[in-house]
Image (cartoon, helix red, strand yellow):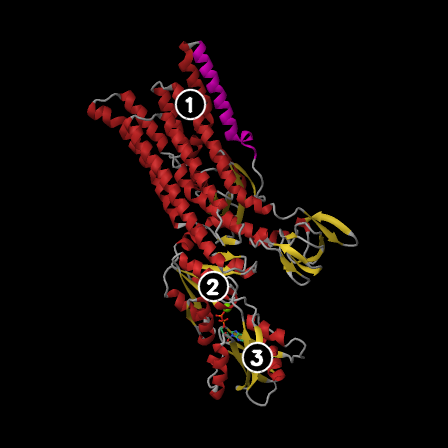
Amino acid sequence: MAGKDRREWRVTGMDCAACVTKVTRALAPLPGVSGVDVALMAERLTLQLAPGTTPPEVIEARVKALGYGIAAKAAPQGEDPWYRTGKGRLVVVSGLVLVLAWGLAWLMPQVATGAFALACLIGLAPVARRAAVALWMGQPFTIESLMTLAALGALWIGAAEEAALVVFLFAVGEVLEGLATAKARDGIRALVALVPKTAWVEAGGLHEVPAAALQIGQVILVRPGDRIPADGTILEGVSGVDESPVTGESLPRLRAPGDAVFAGSINTEAALRITVTRGAEDNTIARIIRLVSEAEESRAPTERFIDRFSRWYMPAIVGLSALVVILPPLALGADWQVWTYRGLALLLIGCPCALVISVPASVASALSSGARRGLLLKGGAAVEAAAGVRSIAFDKTGTLTEGHPRVTDVVAFGPSSEAEILTLAAAVEAGSGHPLARAILQRAAGLALPQAQAARAWPGRGVTAMVGGVEVAVTAPQHVPDLGAHQAVVAALEAEGKTTVVVLRAGVALGLIAMQDSLRPDARAAMDRLRGLGLVPIMLTGDNPRTAAAMAGALGIDFRAGLLPEDKLAHIRGMEAVMMVGDGINDAPALKQARIGVAMGSGSDVALETAEAAILRDRVGDVAGLVELARATMANIRQNVALALGLKAVFLVTSILGLTGLWLAILADTGATVLVTLNALRLLRFDPKD
Ligand code: ADP
Ligand code: MG
């Protein structure tokens, strides 16, 4: 297989998912082209191109011929005002000629028909051209071809004035649809605007440089009141930092030297000197934006269904209108003129725009609405999954608890001193990132630690390493074969909700270290909220049953304890419609296995990348917020589909009965598209009560 390049373009002027189909089908058959993906809301075209086959210029020319703008990929940017677009010009031109025709018809009624016909043809020309191009590319059923056929048909039966009006209304509709989708896109663009364009760099004095040019390791100065231009670590200064733009956390947090800060946050109090830790295209906000805009690729099952439905809907309606034109006159001797008119009106009902946009518009609004509140959902599939879950499995450490345990007791079983036990444990844990490891290291700060070799983590059990040529293990007590009389000490500590680990040297238990992690302050309220949503929360943990029972009891939820990572996995597999919430670090397999995995943790890399959804604020309550957002989105989608299909059904009947004519048919399609998009935009204001 020859190498393939992934190519990316920005395609403008798509305001309807039918456009997506059109572009996809026009490019897919080209030699060397595969994996064509068009994202409507992100205006992005990506495909794999085998080098030396189709030149990229040919791809660009094809897209242009269909009537869209195409440019090499650039960052999301503002769109042209509507009157500067091709579709806008069409409105102005077809409107003008229509007004002229009306004027002429009033002055000289004998030339009226000719004037309207001319107005219709002028407005129709660009539409007909696009229809012809699509036809030539093997796509007979496009909105443009329906329009062209309907307008020409109307001219033919002498309804010239209506034909001209229909062309004008079609043009207006296209512009309105464009405006509405542009509004939906703004949500994502607003995120980009959060990061300041320039930064003050310290390099032999202060220099203002573009934020995009910042290098990792540079030191920048952020004055009080300014937005932070890069992800970084505070070098000097203590100040309240408002991270609400990134994580949705509305209270400013006090940040001191050594703390991480996100680009886009607001420095509220004092000047900060910050070391840049990530380049502009890689900072948290940039990653969120990429995630939200790429999320479109993961389509909701409902959306795929609607796509399939609309694929046969258009041809079916065309067939039906042909029958309406032919059958009544032939079978019943009805008037040809009347039934041709009704058939043409029916053609216009065949535009599936409102229907096709109903899902992506809602999903796009929901994703950007969520992103601004620290609730990230990776696409329609994640939304639909989150809306449909019935139970929620929580990891304990770092999810239901703060994840910052403190050492409370060190107990020696034999002659070893507490300091000796702590020193050995800390030496072994030095290589581990587990929250318990951090607690032990923190307590051992100041002690001289011996060097450990061949350190190894046993997920869900503990760690081992060689210290001074002897194997030392720090292990969960339930995985230590024989603790004998010490078991009682362990049990007593665990009953207090403490987590204990046993320190062993050459297989001999020297003593234990007990740690306590506190529940997140909002965990209890969050469980009540979840139950209020009809969901069943459950805690899955590798910790021992007694500690787990103490914590689960405080939360009033069920639990399973002593689980190894593979047990967690098996448990998740055994549950239906389950959402797994974890800190994203050691729960990756369980997160993947669940119907939907939610990673919790502010801006942690793993959290953002492993799961289908992420919560940026460290609040358990946001899990409920996420489900509420997902459910609101699905409700919104159902309203949209009902509205789109309902209007179509009504006009299908009224057109056949002859109650409504051509221009109402086209108005109904445009109106439905605009209504559906406006309804989707309501999700931008979604606010989970917390
Ligand atoms: P949780 O399910 O609470 O996130 P883990 O699966 O990470 O817990 O760990 C389960 C148990 O294994 C811990 O309670 C602890 O006893 C032990 N353990 C895991 N990693 C370590 C470590 N680095 N140091 C000490 N003990 C560990
Ligand atoms: Mg864990």
Check if residue 253 falls in the magenta segment.
Answer: no
Name the residue rendered at 42%, 15% in the picture: 114
Q: Relative to residue 306, is residue 624 drawn left or right? A: right
How busy is the neighbourhood of tag 2: few (under 14 within 10 Å), some, or many (20 plus)? some
**Residue that label 1 marks:** 165
Whole-percent x, y for residue 181 in the image: 49, 39
Q: Is residue 350 visible?
A: yes
Q: Position of residue 179 (x, y in %)?
A: 50, 35
Q: Which mark is residue 299?
A: none
Amino acid, disc 1: Leu
Decide which of tag 1 and tag 2 comes sooner along the chain.
Answer: 1
Location of mark 3 (residue) = 409
Tell me the SS state at disc 2.
helix
* Residue at x 47%, y 58% (from the top left corner): 623
* Residue lying at 42% horizontally and 33% vertically, measured from the top left: 671
Q: Which circle's residue, 3 or 2, is located before the other in the chain?
A: 3
| Circle 3: element type | strand
Q: Which residues are magenta?
A: 80-107
Kind of residue indicated by mark 2:
Arg
* Dominant SS in magenta: helix
Q: Is residue 81 magenta?
A: yes
Residue 524, label in figure: 2
Mark 3, residues whose alpha carbon is within 10 Å: few (<14), some, or many (≥20)? some
